[in-house]
Amino acid sequence: MSKAEYPVTQAVRFLRSKKIDFVPYVYAYEEHGGTARFAECTGKPEHQVIKTIVLQDEHKKGLVVLMHGDKHISTRNLARELGLKHIEPATADQATKWTGYLVGGTSPFGMKTALPVYVEESIWALDEIFINGGKRGFIVGMKPENLRTLNPQDVHVAVDA
């Protein structure tokens, strides 16, 4: 796919600035389709489609968790691992304010505000991941090692969907 055939988002600018190789995928976005929609459109395993979830702690401070598309986050276990009392999803407005991205198009790369990033530790074992490129209907494929540019902390908080 040529550069002209995919959007140049803040995430793409970030990846280019770090010289990270990625493969762009543009697909027909569907409201509430989630990672299953991309997997269905491309034939990629949903387990390798990584969702970017914006959460907030009891102090209303934001954080991001990268999770397998076919799993959920145990916010109770996450709070316990981070030594916090409570973690909940951020509102769509708050998530957009912190990241600069619309929900459904949130990428951990090139966020407006530097939020702490946590990655489900089993993601590192994958050969390839597919993660949002900063726009609804736009995913980038890459090696999981590229997530290290975000200085993430490993967590073990996945639960079956």
Image: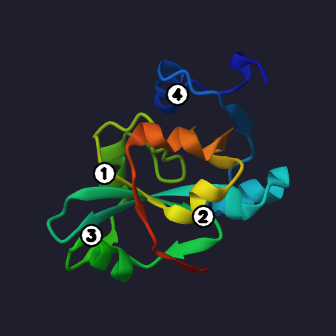
Q: Nearer the viewer, mark 3 or mark 1?
A: 3
Label 4: element kind:
helix
Under mark 2, the amino acid is: His
Asked if 160 appears above or below 37 in the picture, the reply is below
The numbered dot on residue 106 is: none
Please give the residue where the numbered disc 1 appears in the rendered image. Answer: 116
How far is disc 3 from disc 2 in space, using C-alphas? 20 Å
How far is disc 4 from disc 1 in space, using C-alphas? 18 Å
Q: Disc 3 or 1, which lies upstream in sequence? A: 3
Tell me which corner region of the image, top left, top right, bottom left or bottom right, holds residue 157: bottom left
User: Marks 1 and 2: CB-CB under 8 Å?
Assistant: no
Q: Disc 1 or 2, which lies upstream in sequence? A: 2
Please give the residue where the numbered disc 2 appears in the rendered image. Answer: 68
User: Marks 3 and 4: CB-CB under 8 Å?
Assistant: no
Q: Disc 3 or 2, which lies upstream in sequence? A: 2
Residue 16 image point, x, y percent: 54, 21
Label 3: element kind:
helix
Q: Is residue 89 left or right of residue 17?
A: left
Please give the residue where the numbered disc 3 appears in the rendered image. Answer: 82
Q: Residue at 27% x, 64% y: name it.
A: 56
The numbered dot on residue 15 is: 4
Q: Nearer the viewer, mark 3 or mark 4?
A: 3
Residue 161 image point, x, y percent: 61, 80
Farthest residue toward the right? 43
Under mark 1, the amino acid is: Pro
